[in-house]
Amino acid sequence: MLLRSATVRDLDRLTARVFDTATRSSGARLDAYRIDDHFYIDIDLPGIDPAGIDITVDHNVLTVRAERRRRADGEDADVIVTERPAGPVSRQVFLSDTLDTDRLEARYEQGVLTLNIPVAEKAQPRKVEVSVG
């Protein structure tokens, strides 16, 4: 029984590590939320040079691409441990037609890319008057 419990626990740890690695290497984590007439997307991009962030919108598909380099890249370094992910990072988000992507603004601060997309005026709630008679 002890051997089986240890084996199951080891398998659980291995599975968690595989999925965690896949998540970290395939894309950046994000939060999306709306405040009043603006839609925001916060994307974690720690250690990224802001000049190397590429943002495109094509047919309502927002794509963010960047590359995280290791400090020792290109140097003759004797690397001891490498746990931080490096290499290309990308994330795609499908946007609603109700967003005005022509007025999208991007800001990078403390490792977080914040995208601010206004809600299109035609999609904003409006009051309809009721006529009498």
Image (cartoon, rainbow, N blue to C red):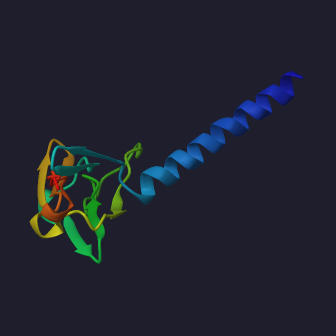
| Quarter of the rendering occupied by the C terminus | bottom left
Q: Quadrant of residue 69?
A: bottom left
**In the depicted structure, whether residue 101 falls above or below residue 14:** below
Answer with left or right where residue 126 lies relative to residue 79.
left
Residue 8 pos. (x, y %): 77, 33
Residue 131 pos. (x, y %): 15, 55
**Residue visible at 24% across and 72% down?**
57
**Residue visible at 16% across and 62% down?**
120
**In the depicted structure, whether residue 3 falls above or below residue 12:** above
**In the depicted structure, whether residue 32 falls above or below residue 65:** above
**Residue visible at 21% across and 49% down?**
40
Toward the top, the furthest residue is: 2
| Quarter of the rendering occupied by the N terminus | top right
Q: Nearer the viewer, residue 40 or 6?
A: 40
Residue 30 pos. (x, y %): 33, 48
Answer with left or right where residue 127 lies relative to residue 69.
left
**Residue visible at 29% across and 68% down?**
63
How many numbered discs? 0
Q: Quadrant of residue 6?
A: top right
Residue 96 pos. (x, y %): 31, 64
Q: Nearer the viewer, residue 77 or 64?
A: 64
Toward the right, the furthest residue is: 1
